[in-house]
Amino acid sequence: MRSIHHRLFVFSALALLAVLPAPAADKAPAPKATPYPLIMGPIRLWDGPAPGALGDTAKDIPTLTPYRPAAGQANGATMLVLPGGGYGNLAEHEGTGYAEFFAQNGITAYVLKYRLGSNGYRHPVMLGDAARALRLLRAFARRDGLDPARIGVIGSSAGGHLASTLVTHFDAGKPDATDAIERESSRPDLGILCYPVISLLEFAHSGSRKNLLGENPPADLVKFLSSELQVTKDTPPCFLWHTVEDKAVPVENSLLFASALRRAGVPVSLHIYEKGAHGLGLGRPDRPAPPWASQLLYWFKERKFTP
């Protein structure tokens, strides 16, 4: 009896092996190395010291922190997140908060820790950090099988000013650059501006202007960084939202930029809400935000940025 059981067991095992796929004769080829390693933690924008660095501490090192959708949920789009904070600090809810929202909706997001005026930095350092970050995201998209033609930027308040600067002061990259990242374009494919600082003139947020440009900046530089004056037909499509009640950054900032986009023939989706203080972000129970986020997701589909 025992021998019969033994023979049955051996026969069953052999039958199972017969239906299993045979092992490959050779090992699968190792993935090709890329110059852009897949890192989950903060990623330095430059391998060495950042251009114009005043030191080598955390405040002198701009970084990107990735937030990826759940496995199998990425829809191919990528978002660069620029937190606000008056160019003096970085607001967590306008950084991590947004990035988590995008990741939950299938969009790969990266939060940029850019250098600040409160740490002694002035223009063009902030724009240089944002442009380098956008180039990196385009390279990452190629590496990760995402769409390098669906990369957006979102910024709030002073981060909105930096985003508006990026969508009006970009370049196509340098084809002959020895650094492969510098060959990538810094032009976002669309921009999202949340209660943004746009103008550094009549409706300026004085704290942001001071941190960005210092005391008594030249008049031509102030105009150069007043984004409503820099829109062209090549500026990417933009989504803007603001509240009339905003006492920190007047709603005229968004109205001026939307008007400039309209005159240049650039697609724009403008949302002005009556109620709400400055800096709401996605809102919280004691400070609800207008329904801009759901309208943004609708706009993404309109523009075929997401499926």
Image (cartoon, rainbow, N blue to C red):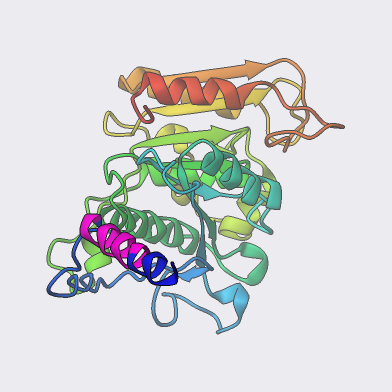
Quadrant where the image shows the C terminus? top left
Of 213 and 273, the residue lying toward us: 273
From what the image shows, is residue 5 above or below residue 150?
Answer: below
The chief SS type of the magenta part is helix
**x and y percentages locating residue 117 in the rendered image:** 62, 63
Of 260 and 105, the residue lying toward us: 105
From what the image shows, is residue 297 above or below residue 204?
Answer: above
Quadrant location of residue 284? top right
In the image, farthest residue toward the top: 274
Q: Is residue 291 magenta?
A: no
Q: Is residue 11 magenta?
A: yes
From what the image shows, is residue 94 above or below residue 267?
Answer: below
**x and y percentages locating residue 35 in the rendered image:** 27, 73
- Picture residue at 24% right of the left edge, 74% below the top: 33
Quadrant where the image shows the N terminus? bottom left
Of 304 and 193, the residue lying toward us: 304
Which contiguous range is marked in magenta? 8-19
**x and y percentages locating residue 198 in the rendered image:** 54, 37
52 displayed left or right of 213: left
**x and y percentages locating residue 55 in the rendered image:** 56, 84
Q: How many marks?
A: 0
Residue 216 in sight in this render: no
